[in-house]
Amino acid sequence: MRIARIETEDGIKTVVSVGESFLDLEDILGMPVTEEGKSFYAIVLKNIEKIRNFVAEGHYAGITDHVPTSYLVPMPYINQIRDFYAFEGHVRTARSLRGLDMVPEWYEFPAYYYSGNSSIYASDHDLPYPRFSSELDFELEVGAIIGKEGRNIPVGDAWSHIFGFTLMNDWSARDQQRKEMKIGLGPSKSKDFATSIGRFIVTADEMAEHLDQDRKLDCGLQASLNGSLFVEGNLKDMHWTFQEMISWASTETMLKPGDVIMSGTVSGGCILEKGAGKGGWLKIGDQVSFHSEILGDLVTRIVGED
C-alpha cells in the first residue's frame, strides 16, 4: 500500500494511493489521522489490515478522492536519520577515487552517519543550489522508516519494526565533503543542507512480498538526469540488509517511530562515481528524477538561491 501526504484545495490530507486515486485515510478509518509525532505511525500500524483489506476489496463509496496540488513529505514526523554505507560497489569506487582500498572493518559492521532532519524536501519541490558549494551531486538511496520502537533488536525481529520504505536523495556538496573527510569525523555540512524524500511510503507488509530467499529486497531503482537514464540498480545488491542495519543501529540505544534508516548510495548512483568529467556536477536548471516500479518517484529541480 502506498501512503502519501498531499496538499489539496481542502488542505493537507493523508491519503492511500490506489491507481490514479488518492483516497482519504481518515474516511477509510473513520477516525482522525493525527499529524502529531509518532502517533501517526501507531494509528496506521494498528489499522494496517483494515486499510489493506479495504483497498483490496475496492469498495470506495463514500471515500473522498482528493486531487493533489502538490506532494508533501509522506510522513508528518521525522525523528533521527541514520545514513548507512551498504552498497559495496559504491564504497569501493568512492574509496578508490581517493586512492584508498577497502578496509576490513567495513565488513565487520554496517557503518553510518547522522544526517539532519531540518532541511527535508518533498518530491516535486525545487532545491536551492547550496551557496557554499560548486560541486553539487545526488545520491540514489532508499529509506526504511521505523514505526515501532525497539532497543537491541535481533536481526530476525527487525522487519517488524519497519513502517515502510521510500525513495530518498542524499544531496552532497562534494567540494565541501572532501575537506570534511580530511578532518576524520565524517561528512557534516556537505550532507545536512538537504535531503529529499519520495512521493510515497510503501508499507512494510507490501514490501515483504519482494524479499528474496536471503531476506534481501528485490527492488529495482533508476536515476535519470534531465530525462536521460543515469543508472539502474537494485536493493538486492546491498551487502548489509535493512534488518542488519536496524539491528546494529538499535544496539544499546532506542530506535523510535519516525527514525529513518537510509541504505547508502546504490552502486553507480551518483556523479562522483562516474566522474564529473562526463558532464560535470549538477547545475541550476538540472532535474534529477528517481523511479522505482515499487516505490514510485522522486523528482527535484535545481534552482538558484532566492
Image (cartoon, helix red, strand yellow):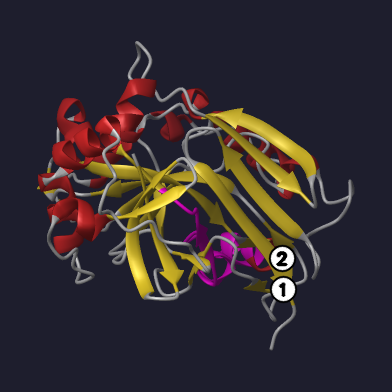
Residue 15 visible, this angle: yes
**As drawn, 170 above or below 208:** below
Residue visible at 56% across and 42% down?
265
Residue 236 horizontal/vertical position (percent)? 48, 23
**Residue 195 included in the magenta stretch of the image:** yes
Q: Position of residue 215 (x, y in %)?
A: 33, 19
**Residue 106, horizontal then vertical, whole percent:** 45, 34
Q: Quadrant of residue 257?
A: bottom left
Amino acid at circle 2: Asp
Image height check: is 202 above or below 41?
above
In front of the other: 214 or 294: 294
Tell me, yes or no, whether the highlighted magenta stretch contains residue 51.
Answer: no
Q: Is residue 108 left or right of residue 31?
A: right
Which residue is found at the position 69% from the left and 89% from the top? 306
Residue at numbered disc 1: 133
Q: Crowdedness of circle 2 by 10 Å Cα count: few (<14), some, many (20+)?
A: some
Q: Residue furthest top?
A: 213
| Dot 2 and dot 1 residues touching (CB under 8 Å) | yes
Which residue carries the number 2 mark? Answer: 175
Nearer the N terminus, badge 2 or badge 1? 1
- State whether residue 115 appears in this view: no
Q: State which region is magenta.
A: 177-200
Taking the spot 16% from the left edge, 46% from the top edge, the residue there is 45
Q: Quadrant of residue 65?
A: bottom left
Instruction: Measure the alpha-carbon separation of dots 2 and 1.
Output: 6 Å
Horizontal side of residue 155 vs 176, given as left or right: left
Circle 1 packing at 10 Å, graded few (<14), some (14-19), many (20+), is some
Considering the image in quadrants, where does the N terminus appear?
top left
Q: Nearer the viewer, residue 250 or 182?
A: 250
Q: Position of residue 6 (x, y in %)?
A: 43, 64
Residue lying at 22% horizontally and 57% vertically, measured from the top left:
27
